[in-house]
Amino acid sequence: MNEETEEKVEVGTPLTSEDEFWIEKMLELSANSIRSIEEAGKQIIGMITVMQGIYAAVLAFSGIKEIPKGSIPAAIFYISPVFLWLISLFFALRVFKTKRYRYFSNSPDSSKNTFKAIVDFKQKNLNIAYSFLTISFAIAALGIIYWLVRA
């Protein structure tokens, strides 16, 4: 047999119990990844609800609602968290959106790629929702702090 066409098989070292432990942990994480992403989406939706309630109470009882009367930029500043929360809510809800994926059930590669596509879609939407939530929280906090310092 020609050496150039002969396949070379490398034999690795046997897995240790620690190696097997970490491989098993990664398999568990992979199996639960969609559930954990969806749980994080639920948490973001809950946080948006709480933040809207707090922000509405602050606006209603503190007199902040009078600031925008004289200034369009101030009105945009104090209203922007609400719009950002709506955008965040939209992307958090997309975490739960179902899509039809084409895959071949007898193909490990197809199954793996489909699973990865599902996780990537959900994770991308969760990250966008989280980003808008973070920005909205920062703007709302700055507005409240500014009003408290100014008053």
Image: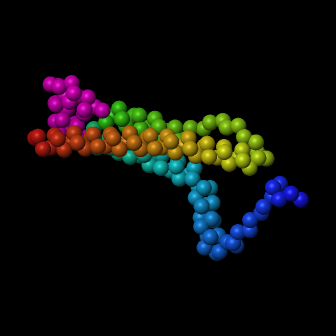
- Who is closer to the viewer here, 77 or 14? 14
Q: Can you give x and y, in whole percent of width and height, for residue 37 in the image?
A: 52, 49
- Who is closer to the viewer here, 14 or 36? 14
Quadrant for residue 88, please give it. Answer: top left
Quadrant for residue 45, please give it. Answer: top left
Labels in figure, total: 0
Say which residue appears at 18% left-offset and 35% top-offset.
64
Lateral position of residue 6 relative to residue 116, left or right: right
Q: Residue furthest right?
A: 1
Say which residue appears at 52% left-offset and 37% top-offset.
94
Q: Residue furthest left?
A: 151
* Residue 49 in view of the camera: no
Quadrant for residue 148, please give it. Answer: top left
Lateral position of residue 4 relative to residue 36, left or right: right
Q: For the magenta stretch, what is the residue range?
A: 57-80
Q: Main secondary structure of the magenta part?
A: helix
Say which residue appears at 66% left-offset and 45% top-offset.
113
Lateral position of residue 48 relative to residue 103, left or right: left
Quadrant of the frame with the N terminus:
bottom right
Q: Can you give x and y, in whole percent of width and height, for residue 144 in the image?
A: 21, 42
Quadrant of the frame with the C terminus:
top left
Say which residue appears at 44% left-offset and 40% top-offset.
128
- Who is closer to the viewer here, 128 or 66? 128
Q: Can you give x and y, in whole percent of width and height, for residue 96 in the image?
A: 55, 41
